Image: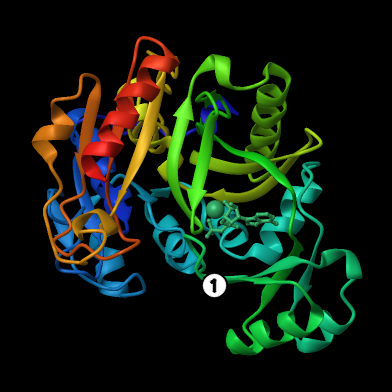
Amino acid sequence: SQASLPSSVVPGDWLGILGGGQLGRMFCHAAQSLGYKVAVLDPDEHSPAGAVADLHIQAGYQDEAALARLSERCKAITTEFENVPALSLETLADNVRVSPAGAAVAIVQDRIQEKAFIRKAGVPVAPYVAVRQSEDIVTAPDTLFPGILKVARLGYDGKGQARVSSRAEAMAAFEGFQQAECVLEAMLPLASELSVILARGYDGKVALFPSAQNEHRDGILAVSTVDDSLLDASLAGQAADAAVSIAQALEYVGVLCVEFFVLRDGSLVANEIAPRPHNSGHFTMNASASSQFEQQARAMAGLPLGNTDSLCPVVMLNLLGDLWFAENSGTAREPDWAGVLAIPGAKLHLYGKAQARPGRKMGHVNVLGATLAEARVRAQQVAQILG
Ligand code: ADP
Ligand code: MG
């Protein structure tokens, strides 16, 4: 009931976040511009969010004294880090409001539970089996090959995944993962990939951003494109409905992303859930009336959610550490930022990471245009300058 809703946390108060990566950094910027103070808990002394937070508590996610300090300082706490111990969220929740809840995060951080939960919420997933022991591979249906073996926990950006064309290969991959719990899922014929990002408040109200069409390279997001003209309206509607069903079933509060596959037969399959703002939602920083990070602050604070209308078509280009090395010689170099900034509509976001490494997310560029065609031409120019 309305009466049991916590009172809102207002600008000037402290918000806390577990995790100090780029998502935490962009959250800090958004929350601070609303007038909040932000405390970041992250063990890394050079964490991108720690560098911009009002307070960086440099400690592990299970450090009880650090968690106590965070909950004393802050009126509301969230996470930017999917693998934060769910128990830490639950501990914090004894003293301060925490969103999303530890129980929701616990489901999402285990692919076995996540897939079962999505299916129970009435949303299709890829055919799969849970693999807890090698016997599970022996008894897996033939229809799962060729497939992908994914570790159930701690995988990201295609890490902890092996494409397997046979049972023998799956067995070898399972050994390679030290028999950590996995899911084995069928390799699906993808026509495209999309994601839906939404925010859900303590009052159950939901605000959806338009879905993004995503291109991955080597298992890592490379490009997200957002424009009304891009997606079939019925497909976009299905994805939005599915994401809302999942958020409701999780009794979720905060920002949530659901990644989908569009199969060649036109059907839609949910792939995974992220209990936080998502790389494919970075377009909202320049092309939406509110950003996904502003929504995260609003939702956790119990404030009205922001308007999610699109301002213009946008192409988001991820900047991976590879760009800091010349293609053939591999010598270190600094990308041509002046060249990028000379392109109209190119909005540069760098995460302040000192060390570039291949595959490491260093920043992104949102390329805006009056039309999708214009955004694409400009994005092409940006890519050329960076290439
Ligand atoms: P991560 O946690 O690394 O993002 P995902 O499960 O999202 O893991 O997989 C990364 C990418 O690999 C997906 O975006 C997609 O391009 C591809 N992929 C994953 N599962 C499948 C599948 N069952 N069939 C086809 N492609 C897949
Ligand atoms: Mg993914």
Image position of 60 with respect to 209: above or below: below
Image position of 323 with respect to 301: above or below: below
Residue 159, given in percent of the width and then of the height, sits at 50, 68
Looking at the rendering, which quadrant does residue 160 occupy? Answer: bottom right
Looking at the rendering, which quadrant does residue 183 occupy? Answer: bottom right
Disc 1 target residue: 160
- Is residue 285 at least partly visible in the picture? no
**What's the image's color scheme?**
rainbow
Which of these two is toward me, 97 or 57? 57
Disc 1 marks a residue whose amino acid type is: Gly
Residue 370, given in percent of the width and then of the height, sits at 35, 9
Image position of 23 with respect to 321: above or below: above
Image position of 38 with respect to 6: above or below: below
Q: Which residue is painted at 73% across and 59% down in the image? A: 187
Which element type, helix, strand or loop, lies under badge 1? loop
Residue 94, given in percent of the width and then of the height, sits at 43, 58
Q: Is residue 343 left or right of residue 161?
A: left
Q: Which residue is painted at 32% across and 59% down in the image? A: 19
Q: Is the residue at mark 1 in contact range of ligand 1, meaning its CB lies under 8 Å from it?
A: yes
Q: Which residue is painted at 34% across and 15% down in the image? A: 369
